[in-house]
Image: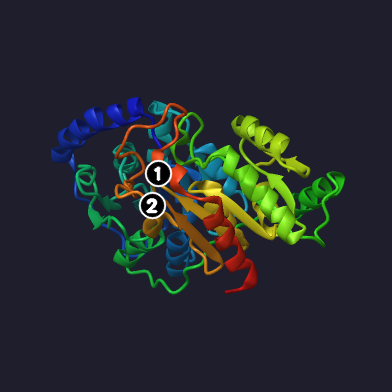
Amino acid sequence: MQSNRFQQFLDRYLGIPLHLLLRPLLKHRPIPDTPKKILFIQLSALGDTILAIPAIRAVRHAFPNAEFTVLASPTNLNYLTHCPYINKRIRFRTLGPALFAQLRQEGFDWAIDLEHWPRLSALLAYASGAPMRIGFRTHGQHRHFLFTTSVPHTAGQHEVRNFLDLATRLGCPTLEFGLEVWYSESEQTWVHQTLTEEGISLERPLFALHPEAGRRGEPRRRWSPERYVALANALVARYDGQIVLTGAPGEVEISQEIAKRTKHRSVVLAGQTDVNQLAALFAAATLVVSGNCGPMHLAAAAGTRVVGLHGPTNFAQWGPWSHKAGVVCAELPCSPCLNLGFEYGCQALPDGTSPCMHTIEVGWVLEACERLLSGC
């Protein structure tokens, strides 16, 4: 879960005392072996939700007749719009009595907290009144006191496998490991019409570059625009490729900056797609290049080739989960420094980026692209 420092401060210094105060009030109620209503809590960034799908799917296969509800942020709910494993969706915006009342009224049998460090989600699991509450026991986070069952969150283990550990603890067979996207026919049609209007032909290679990486205002995972420009020029020259630049509405400026500097025309679609349109766009692309962020995982889930750029983030834990993916890592002794998403090991540079991202050379990324495009 991404968080600014103030949110992290509140979560820690209010969340931990609340856990300790509420723990003596726990009432042990009979836990049904076959739950009728299951709540999943996933408030974090898009990538975490995408990586949790194999675990949610495993629980669905084990309990096909249960009603599944997800409590999630608006972006995550947009991604889950067409998800066949979810019956009901609760939009999380702010805490309040109305939310607590709604959770209580649902009468959940199980609450499954998919977060790995925040205490807020564990408090919501407790507030749901579900007799069975399961979540991660993460080292140093003091967030597991209100669960009836907890599972160790293993640093350095890929998050897909961490999520699957929850399903395994619940006795659910974990036989399928692939990620998924569920864009509709209308979203796919929008992509093809938009590309046609922009003069892009799918008969030629299409490279999608996603230059931002992470929440706006925290560009520590961003690769420099100058190197994206050089990469775009090389991909066009080598493969007669076409370049599309993607991003959220708040990320348009950096895409426009890159497009203005490339030798050949680059199409800026940043700010024009919702998450499922972006998934459909990535599915149509020949290859996607991105720093570690939700769209990187979305590209992997869409089944396209993807190169993930990792500086502060641990690629073993957060790399694209796909056999059609490559990773390029920074070369600094302190890299990677992130497992949970906030414990950066060094000060950001004046432009907000991490020093390690500047060690990633254009040639390394181009070589990773070449390996995927050649099938090696």
Residue at image position (30%, 42%) is 122
Which label's residue is closer to the chain start, 1 or 2? 2
The amino acid sitting under disc 2 is: Glu
Which of 172 and 127 lies nearest the eye of the viewer? 172
Residue 374 or residue 338, whichever sits in front = 374
The reply to whether discs 1 and 2 touch (Cβ–Cβ < 8 Å) is: yes
Disc 1 target residue: 356
Would you say 163 lies left or right of 144 here? Answer: right
Of residue 77 and residue 250, the one placed in the foreground of this image is: 250
The image quadrant that residue 349 belongs to is top left
Please state, as top left, top right, bottom left or bottom right, where the C terminus lies in the image: bottom right
- Up the image or down, 118 lies above or below 53; here it is above
Residue at x 31%, y 58% (from the top left corner)? 156
Q: Position of residue 59 (x, y in %)?
A: 42, 64
User: Which residue: 58% across, 68% down?
Assistant: 371
Q: Which residue is mark 2?
A: 331
Residue type of the residue flagged with mark 1: Cys
Can see residue 15? yes
Whole-percent x, y for residue 356 in the image: 40, 44
